[in-house]
Image (cartoon, grey):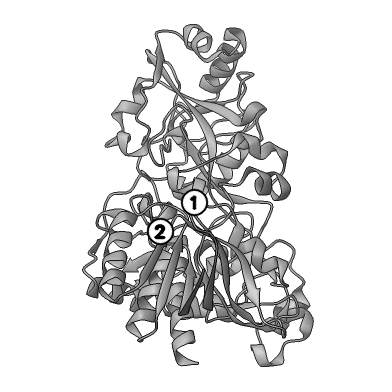
Amino acid sequence: MNHTFDVVVAGCGVAGLSAAVTAAERGLKVAILERASQEDRGGQSRYTEAYLRMKAIDEVTDDFETYLASNVGLYADPELMAEMSTGRENWSQVARSLAIPDPEVIGNFADHVPATIKWLQGLGVKFDFLPTQFLTKTQPRLLPVGGGAALVDALAAQADKLGVTFFYHTTARKLLQDERGVVTGLLAQQQGAGHVRFAGQVVLACGGFEGNPALQSKYIGPRSVYLRPICKGGYFNRGEGIEMALDIGAAPSGDFGSYHAEPIDPRSSVPEPSVFIFPYGILVNKAGQRFVNEAPGTVDAWYERITRRIYEQDEGIAYVILDQRVKDIPNYRLGIRTDQPAIEAETIDALAAKLGVMPEALRATVSAYNAACPTTGSYDPLNVDGLATTGLMPPKSNWSRPLDRGPYMAYPIISANVFTFGGLKVNPVGQVLDTDGEVMPNLYAAGEVIGMYYTNYTGATSVLKGLVFGRLAANQIADE
């Protein structure tokens, strides 16, 4: 079976929908391929709260570009970085093919955020600075009212209105090329129909590979067995879009060995059952020992790095130990999104037994921590307060108060894989580049298919990356 469209979009999250609606608005005939059902469409986008790194409805945060630019890889060659700052027309072949997002990509991304939000407002999406799960934070975060589901529903409704054709239970498998190697469409697997060919310019918007254990093991390593997707939508993201492009010579970009880490309760099956309350207690591993500074700064800026340390522990799990003092924190429940109750006990020994930790080890850890807590200073749970331990390794830099008011509580925490960092290299308008830094005609990428992050996620930019590059890609196609 064959279908012909102007634009074929693989993926029905906010990246794919943004591309499809924009292309349809420009008068193009558009298809969206979605491996899930209509009820489950939207991928991870449907389940996220969709934090946006913006200080106003029409302004990104002051650090938007600088933080992204500082997070594009370790130990970058200074000569090549200097060359890339001179403008794309001056770059050598090496600079053009580096596996990082270049300054013009980051700049164009930031520049097009305000117009994208205004466009979404025109589709009926409302935005506000709503409460977040972070009790302490360094950056403001704008949210769509109704979260990612509101974005998916508004965009899908507009797509229907504009005549976009949806193909559900349809998975993109292979890029089609002509005799010159130019992309001409996609080969897909459609439930009940077998192989189906879709002709047209292609936008890959089908996410990372957090739902594919083989690719996680290949790129992230065998310890990825201790990871799980942050939500149901993540299981649909199996990396085919990235792999099929790499197979025909697309350039990689981003940190293939890493991912966006978030601390979650493994007992819970709700979307994003995060546990961000650990700065007010201590984190211990299965041996009952502390292994990390739980509170080096605001939780929004540090939780990912701390979660990575949890991932390194035996079986990839840790426990946050709290006492009744945590209930003195205003709105402390905002930092606990799991639907499972705390594990409680009257004594530290009894708590250890419930956790399967040696009581002597946990008792010694808590005693050492309590003895290291300051006896002077002003405690401020909603701001960095400098209440640090003394003579304790690892130290705890803030909110250090003894754990001595039972009953004691604990939550298990593992690292969720929110999305993978490795993906494809694109130019400022979302065209996929090959390993020599040249544009691959008729092939575009949006969302997590684009590799942009290394080592640490630039918070509240992933949803924007999907929305902005979906529109950039579609407008480029329409303008050609």
**From mark 1 to mark 2, how far is it between C-alphas?**
9 Å
Q: Is residue 227 above or below residue 144?
A: above
- Asked whether, in this view, residue 135 is left or right of residue 423, the answer is left
The secondary structure type at the circle numbered 1 is helix
Q: Quadrant of residue 305?
A: top right
Where is residue 181 shown, x and y percent of the image? Answer: 70, 81
Picture coordinates of residue 412 (x, y %)?
49, 26
At label 2, the amino acid type is Gln
Mark 1: amino acid: Ala
Badge 2: residue crowd in 10 Å (few <14, some 14–19, many ≥20): some
- Circle 1 sits on which residue? 301
Residue 325, given in percent of the width and then of the height, sits at 35, 24
Residue 95 visible in the displayed image: yes
Residue 419: give its label. none
Tell which of 108 and 247 is nearer to you. Answer: 247
State which tag comes first along the sequence, 1 or 2: 2
Q: Nearer the viewer, residue 393 or 311?
A: 311
Do the residues under discs 1 and 2 have CB atoms within 8 angstroms? yes
Residue on which disc 2 sits: 139
